[in-house]
Image: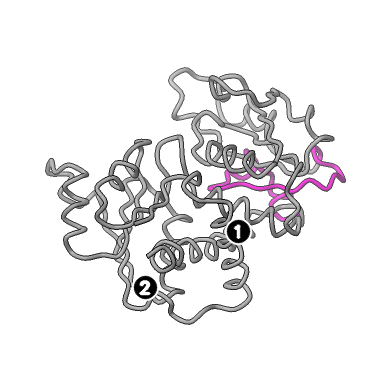
């Protein structure tokens, strides 16, 4: 039984196969490869893109999807997550897609070896399908030539499971990663190049991945408000000028704080490409775990 808790569980060969499936699915939707399969989505944190993307991906493959709202489940009555999961698995699903605020929840459920578990984002450590779709977006744009590409991640890196997953997967694939953020937004220990000003990296990167500033997750005020943050870290036309840097963001984008309105409409902005590719990459992940790996 194979799970997807983090991308390190996938071999390079499996990642290449995922990307090839995603490419084929994008060119032409497949027949219902997962007809009569049942998936349960179990999201203990709010989600728009990830949950919808998984549901669309599953239905494109012919699977049925049931969403459990934890806010209305027996976890509110004191049932443990492990017991909730075990009871759901007793109903015979073919896989469970889980999001949780704790880093180890998806791995703990996977260790129960009841059904394949897919991590849809956990704590501040792992969001494997986001990392895969980000990498696939770059793979597609650069026509597979990723070795030596330079990516700067800008924003609240310390709280970002997307950044953590991207860093691990990108470096594995030969991509050079640098970090740009105020010091309180930086991870405590890293061997990656660090900068406090975006201007320092503009002439040395191919891609900027902007992140939402999660001011609410910091105990001490870092900025008085988002406007102060935006003055230093918002990606704007004035900042980029005519540089051919690709701009990405995992969403939700705070307009004119993370990225300006003008850049969101700019051809260099890949945000909607990421969302589109997310469906096809997640289709490939579901095919791998529910069909190929069995």
Of the pair 171 and 83, the residue shown nearer to us: 171
Pick whichever of labels 1 and 2 is earlier in the sequence: 1
**Left or right, 233 with reference to 6:** right
Q: Is residue 255 magenta?
A: yes
Q: Position of residue 250 (x, y in %)?
A: 56, 48
Q: Measured from the top left, where is residue 282 in percent x and y?
A: 49, 61
In this view, the residue farthest toward the bottom is 31
Principal secondary structure, stretch drawn in magenta: loop
- Residue at 75 percent across and 59 percent down: it is 143
Task: Work out whether 254 lies above or below 284.
Answer: above
Name the element at disc 1: helix
Other residues around mark 1 within 10 Å, as few (<14) / some (14–19) / many (≥20): few
Name the front one of labels 1 and 2.
1
Quarter residue 106 falls in: top left
Tell me if residue 186 comes above or below residue 166 in the rendering: above
Counting from the top left corner in percent of width and height, residue 160 is at 51, 36
Report x, y in % for residue 97: 35, 55
Range of residues picked out in magenta: 238-266
Q: In this figure, which residue is indicated by the disc labeled 1?
A: 16
User: Residue beneath label 2, please?
Assistant: 63
From this view, report whether residue 29 is shown above or below residue 182: below
The answer to if 199 sits in the magenta stretch is no
Residue at image location 26% in from the left, 54% down from the top: 69
Instruction: Assess disc 2: are there few (<14), some (14-19) or many (≥20) residues with their C-alpha within 10 Å of its C-alpha.
Output: many
Q: SS of the residue at dot 2?
A: loop
């Amino acid at each position: 039984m194979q799970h997807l808790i983090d991308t390190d569980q996938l071999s390079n060969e499996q990642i290449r196969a995922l990307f090839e499936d995603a490419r084929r699915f994008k060119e032409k939707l497949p027949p219902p490869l997962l007809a009569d399969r049942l998936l349960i989505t179990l999201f203990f944190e709010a989600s728009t893109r990830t949950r919808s993307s998984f549901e669309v991906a599953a239905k494109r493959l012919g699977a049925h999807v049931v969403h459990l709202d934890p806010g209305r489940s027996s976890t509110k009555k004191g049932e443990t997550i492990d017991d909730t999961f075990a009871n759901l698995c007793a109903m015979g699903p073919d896989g469970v897609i889980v999001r949780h605020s704790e880093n180890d929840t998806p791995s703990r459920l996977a260790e129960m070896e009841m059904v394949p578990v897919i991590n849809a984002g956990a704590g501040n450590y792992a969001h494997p399908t986001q990392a895969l779709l980000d990498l696939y977006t770059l793979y597609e744009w650069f026509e597979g030539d990723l070795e030596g590409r330079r990516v700067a991640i800008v924003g609240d890196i310390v709280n970002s499971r997307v950044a953590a997953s991207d860093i691990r997967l990108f470096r594995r694939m030969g991509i050079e990663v640098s970090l740009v953020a105020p010091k309180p937004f930086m991870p405590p220990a890293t061997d990656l190049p660090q900068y406090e000003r975006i201007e320092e990296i503009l002439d040395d990167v191919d891609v900027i991945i902007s992140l939402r500033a999660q001011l609410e997750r910091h105990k001490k005020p870092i900025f008085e408000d988002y406007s102060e943050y935006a003055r230093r870290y918002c990606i704007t036309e004035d900042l980029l000028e005519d540089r051919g840097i690709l701009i990405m963001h995992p969403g939700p984008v705070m307009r004119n704080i993370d990225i300006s309105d003008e850049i969101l409409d700019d051809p260099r902005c890949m945000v909607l490409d990421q969302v589109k590719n997310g469906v096809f990459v997640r289709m490939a992940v579901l095919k791998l775990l529910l069909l190929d790996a069995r």
